Amino acid sequence: MRIGPYTLANALFVAPMAGVTDRPFRQLCRAFGAGYAVSEMITSRPDLWQSVKTQRRADHRGESGPIAVQIAGTEPALMAQAALWNIDRGAQIIDINMGCPAKKVCNKWAGSALMQNEALALAIIEAVVAACAPRGVPVTLKMRTGWCEAEKNALRMARAAESAGIALLTIHGRTRDQGYRGVAEYDTIAAVKAALDIPVVANGDIDSPEKARAVLRHTGADALMIGRAAQGRPWIFREIDHFLRTGEHLAPPLVVEVRRALLDHLQAHYAFYGESAGVRSARKHIGWYVRDWPGAEAFRAHMLSLETADAQYAAVAQYLDELAAQSERLWPATNPSRVEICSETA
């Protein structure tokens, strides 16, 4: 699997998720078998580039390449400028966000709202590609199937994007109106893949090895992008990779391995955000890890009462020690999505 000059370890991608795919989380997913990770989106507004949030999102120190940064905005010139600003800070691949359904993004006509204005979307793509080409930096695009069920224009936009120089296209199998509700459909992704020569990546509801194989077979996609299913379960990448290569399931991870990974993740998280912000933002990650484990509800409630990194870290270590005394391995993931593919003609 290649993006421009870069050869990836495999065809399993970590989706860019605001407030989630920070540098510690990307590094964690890579350690568990993801071949590629895209950063949280960075605004194209220059007046916000010096903010603490943007500076953190543009921090790639110690991260293995290729470094992919997603940018979001509505003005072609500012998007081109944002691409160059991020390249100067280490970005090796620039991804354009036309897939985010969040109201605070779409209300400003960024993210998936751009699918309602194809002329502006294409102007942004052309401006970013033109800015990145002299630097030898590939540009990728993430979008949805359309704005709403009646306006599924992914195929038309995908063809235009390819003609404008996009190197790879990721499609989330939902419209903007759906947000993350309902189920993803993959017929649109299959149609786009059949029409394009560039790599196409399928995204949406891929939460098990069986679902990964089914989506690949249905769409013919070159790669898979996984987002929410990796929250609290970063080892899903190696599980899927092993299953796709061998047809066999890996055993669930050892509790002692998960203990080490989670505690290392917490230490990296505190170092990245500082103690106060790190303790607060780590709570969601801890909650995702333990959601299917014994005593999860009481433990999550206890987490809310802890205000220091030492106390939070110690509580997690003790909880996992108690878990290891009960079982050598974690239990298989619960509540995976149905493997059947949602087809618009079904």
Image: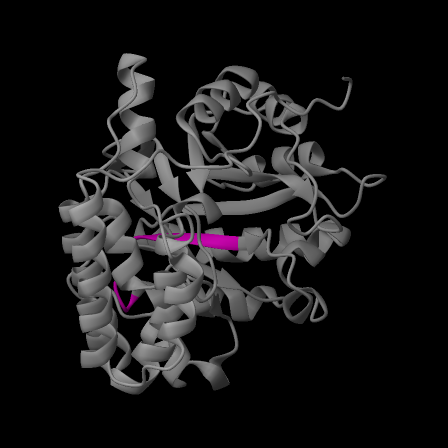
Task: State the residue in front, 3 or 124.
Answer: 3
* Image coordinates for residue 162, horizontal then vertical, percent: 55, 35
Corner quadrant of residue 174: top right
Residue 39 relative to residue 66: left or right: right
* Image coordinates for residue 306, horizontal then vertical, percent: 32, 81
Q: In this view, does 234 lie above or below 96?
A: above
* Image coordinates for residue 274, horizontal then vertical, percent: 25, 83
Q: Which residue is drawn at 44% across and 67% down?
A: 19
Q: Which residue is drawn at 78% across and 18% down?
A: 345
Residue 326 relative to residue 25: left or right: left
Whether residue 73 can be seen here? yes
Q: How many labels sit on residues?
A: 0
> Magenta stretch containing residue 92, yes or no?
yes
Task: State the residue in front, 53 or 279.
Answer: 279
Residue 30 relative to residue 290: left or right: left
Quarter of the picture containing the N terminus is top left
Task: State the residue in front, 70 or 308.
Answer: 308
Q: What stretch is highlighted in magenta?
A: 88-96
Corner quadrant of residue 34: top left
Q: Which residue is drawn at 43% across and 71% down?
A: 301
Task: State the residue in front, 20 or 166.
Answer: 20
Identity of the residue furthest to the right in this view: 150
- Coloring basis for residues: one colour
Q: Residue at x 49, y 41 (%)?
A: 166
